[in-house]
Image (tube, rainbow, N blue to C red):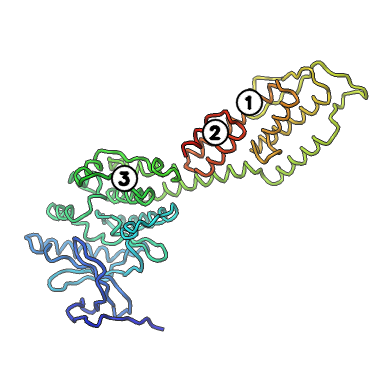
Amino acid sequence: MSETVILPVNKKDNDDFGKYQFVSELGDGAMGTVYKCFDPDFHRMVAIKTVHQDLLTDHSSGEFRERFKNEMRAAGKLTHPNIVSVFDAGEKDNSPYYVMEFVEGQDLKCMMDTKTAFSLKQSLSIIKCVLRGLSNIHKNGITHRDLKPANIFVSKDGVAKIADFGIAKLDNSEMTQIGTIIGSPKYMSPEQCVGEAVDTRTDLFATGIILYELLTGTYCFKADSASAMTQKIINVDIVPPTKIDGQIPRYLDKVLKKALHKDASQRFQNALDFLNALDEGKKNTKQNSTGFKTALIGMGALVSLSVMSVYLYMTEPLVDNAQTDNPKPSSAKVLPASTPFGSDTSRSKIEIVQLSPEKTAKIAKLFKVAETYQRIGRLVSPAGSNAFDAYKIVLNLDPQNERALSGLVTIETLLIQKLMQFKESGDVEQASLVATAGQEVFPNSTAFSDYLRNL
């Protein structure tokens, strides 16, 4: 069944653009007006962008027209799911226009203006679409130069597409001047702000600004005036996004610091480098998270084996095989030279003073349990089956046991290391879990309490 197309009843023939039948006005900007039109040949809606007449009245209009057409021809060769396709170009009333894909959705600026809250997943998805589109544009020798939210369309299914990349590339001195006036200074690179020659890396700088805005809801070079804003773009480093929102993964601080470097040679050198940095950071965060979860709950058969071992240790008679039927209390017992992971390996033996053979045997078994749990990462959970609890039972039997005390210090150190790893990778959820668990068992440790207090 074909789609029904409703044209305005008060439409005049002069409203059309050749075969393209006028439907409605979509928007009006500094450069031109965009119209929604119907293409009867392909039975589809298209968007047509025109250029304002007042931009064509000075002595440079001839060159402007030619560059406009050249860029549209170049853009027409681009075919990519993250670029708004250009179908055709022409003139109406001596003013050039071009015909492009009509995207069912909104431009990103409208979404931002309505205070839409962007999730981390949605923000990264949009920017990755933009970077894939830019990679294709740049490979075809085009620099956008006017990348901003108003030139990014997001379809109803969440796919972002870049538009208007042809008009921005007007790079003779007079046209660059016009481009600067009609463009958006908010998304200019430092080299654009000072009038230097620009290349594809200026588009990556603009992408970094947009990503920062999506993540934080804040413009990173906010100022009271356009000139003050420009000075910030040129001279002032951004505030790391995690300082604004602690839920943002920490790896994005590093990504944005590089993307928004003042020196173009220190930025990402192409869109794929930027894209790979986002993917790699997310991958590392996920691996760290998965690794900790696996260590925390144990691994299959090994965990089962550990539980069985505990049961056997706790239920079998707590006497040494070397003891007689009528054992006598021992004044000293030397345990095997076995130390928990991370403890002082220079200590070859631990003396337990004034313990019965039963307690000595039980402590020996508890150390084996503690070390097993420590190896598989069961440091403080689950309750009753972890290294911390095993060492605490030892200390209930022998309060001055150096080996158990050293084991607790090791567990605290390992937890702090885990906390720092997750904090550095930006995994706030896992860092909070570690800090909460650490504070419960080590209430006097400031590392855990300080982290939780600063969330």
Badge 2: how crowded within 10 Å, few (<14), some, or many (20+)? few
Element class at badge 1: loop
Q: Quadrant of residue 135?
A: bottom left
Please determine whether, in this image, residue 294 is positioned above or below residue 77: above
> Real-space Cα distance between discs 3 and 2?
32 Å
Q: Quadrant of residue 442?
A: top right
Give the residue at x 24% y 49%. Answer: 188
230 or 264: nearer the viewer? 230
Count of marks, rendered view: 3
Badge 3: how crowded within 10 Å, few (<14), some, or many (20+)? many
In the image, 240: left or right of 203? right
Q: Do the numbered discs 3 and 2 sit on residues whose CB atoms are within 8 Å?
A: no
Amino acid at pointer 1: Ser
The residue that disc 3 covers is 220
Mark nearest the camera among 3 and 2 is 3
Give the residue at x 35% y 42%. Answer: 258
Amino acid at pointer 2: Gln
Percent from the top left, x then y, of residue 267? 32, 43
406 or 291: nearer the viewer? 406
> Real-space Cα distance between discs 2 and 1?
15 Å
Give the residue at x 60% y 35%. Answer: 440
Badge 1: how crowded within 10 Å, few (<14), some, or many (20+)? some
Mark nearest the camera among 3 and 1 is 3
Percent from the top left, x then y, of residue 237? 30, 39
Give the residue at x 24% y 83%. Answer: 9
Percent from the top left, x then y, of residue 291? 58, 43
276 or 221: nearer the viewer? 221
The residue that disc 1 covers is 343
Amino acid at pointer 3: Cys
In the image, 110: left or right of 451? left
The residue that disc 2 covers is 417
